[in-house]
Image (spheres, rainbow, N blue to C red):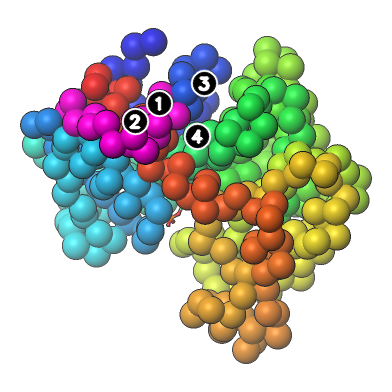
Amino acid sequence: MDLKGRNFLTLKDFTPDEIRYLIDLAADYKEKKKKGILTDTLRGKNVALIFEKTSTRTRCAFEVGAHDLGMGTTYLDPSGSQIGKKESIADTARVLGGMFDGIEYRGFGQEIVEDLAKYAGVPVWNGLTNEYHPTQILADMLTIKEEFGKLEGLKFVYMGDARYNMGNSLMIGCAKLGLDFVACAPEKYFPNKELIEICKGYAKESGATLTFEPDVKKATEGANVIYTDVWVSMGEPDEVWEERIKDLSPYRVTSEVMNNAADNCIFLHCLPSFHDLNTGIGKQIYEKYGLTEMEVTDEVFESKASRVFEEAENRMHTIKAVMAATLGA
Ligand code: CP
Ligand code: NVA
């Protein structure tokens, strides 16, 4: 499998075999790392990490992954560069493309990362946009594969705002890899019709199914994986909280939901998560609306079914695989 020189902007651009290859490559890197085997075959290369939105996991995954591969990294934070304010994306792309071997971008519209890729002349990796979060899906699928030994035929339920980066990307990933994807949300939070049509095409090839079900009991029955994300994403205005709380509270992942799923069901979340009052935003929401937990209860988050920290670790192994494959390690 030769992915050298490719961008990683959305899973739509990758075949099921290519996605499976990246997941397997990540598992291989993970095993080597656990055994202490060095994999620094990209010595002498450098990558730029642009973050127009904040991050813990994605930034650390790119930095540690790059260092393990022998590469240098430069982090450009949400305020510390000229991007957007004094310099266009096209100009930034050409400047960075001349100095670096690869560029990660996290920010707003998907068109920005597409533009960056158009002008950079080196591989560009999407570290999250409003529309997609493709590196997250590789980590999620690796975690599921580690648990069940397979991906095909598993029932995967996404609860919450399925119109945004996580819902979109998980639907694409499931459709390409043959899982039975269920979006469980009020109808207005379903992914857009155009993307659903595209994913139906992938599902036809892979044997996946796509279901859109507002009824929590029906949607989660027999599920192998229950997944959720925050109700309000980075970059969205504070004003949307009230409506989201009202609309999505019935879609909180609770023990009742988990008990309705299969006995072997695991809980996943891309993180960060509001499952207690130990966060600044969590406290503010509690003071304003009286909620002590949001998209998932603390009980489920801390339960034996929760694999969220294994999933977070897998961000690093999978992002390493993306950089290695596209830079030709
Ligand atoms: N899941 C995820 O992308 O986390 P960060 O926002 O911390 O990078
Ligand atoms: N939907 C979330 C995902 C965070 C990893 C956001 O965009 O903020």
Image quadrant in which the C terminus is located: top left
Asked if 156 appears above or below 88 in the picture, the reply is: above
Q: Is residue 2 visible?
A: yes
- Element at badge 2? helix
Q: Is residue 164 visible?
A: no
Point out residue 150 in the picture as x, y percentages from the top left corner: 65, 25
> Closer to the N terminus: mark 4 or mark 2?
2
Q: Residue at x 83, y 42 (%)?
A: 262
Q: Residue at x 32, y 52 (%)?
A: 60
Label drawn at residue 32: 2
> Which amino acid type is shown beneath numbered disc 1?
Asp
Label drawn at residue 20: 3
Asked if 129 appears above or below 208 in the picture, the reply is: below
Measured in 3D between alpha carbons, the distance from the residue under mark 3 to the one under mark 2, in whole angstroms, is: 18 Å
- Find the magenta span and give its range: 25-42
> Closer to the N terminus: mark 4 or mark 1?
1
Measured in 3D between alpha carbons, the distance from the residue under mark 1 to the one under mark 3, in whole angstroms, is: 12 Å
Residue 147 lies in quadrant: top right
Asked if 6 appears above or below 186 in the picture, the reply is: above
Report the residue marked by disc 1: 28
Point out residue 303 in the picture as x, y percentages from the top left corner: 69, 60
Measured in 3D between alpha carbons, the distance from the residue under mark 4 to the one under mark 2, in whole angstroms, is: 18 Å
Q: Is residue 141 left or right of residue 8?
A: right
> Which amino acid type is shown beneath numbered disc 3?
Arg
- Element at badge 4? helix
Label drawn at residue 138: 4
- Element at badge 1? helix
Structural crowding at the residue carrying mark 4, measured as other residues with C-alpha within 10 Å and reported as few (<14), some (14–19) or many (≥20): many
Structural crowding at the residue carrying mark 1, measured as other residues with C-alpha within 10 Å and reported as few (<14), some (14–19) or many (≥20): some
> Closer to the N terminus: mark 3 or mark 2?
3
> Which amino acid type is shown beneath numbered disc 2?
Lys
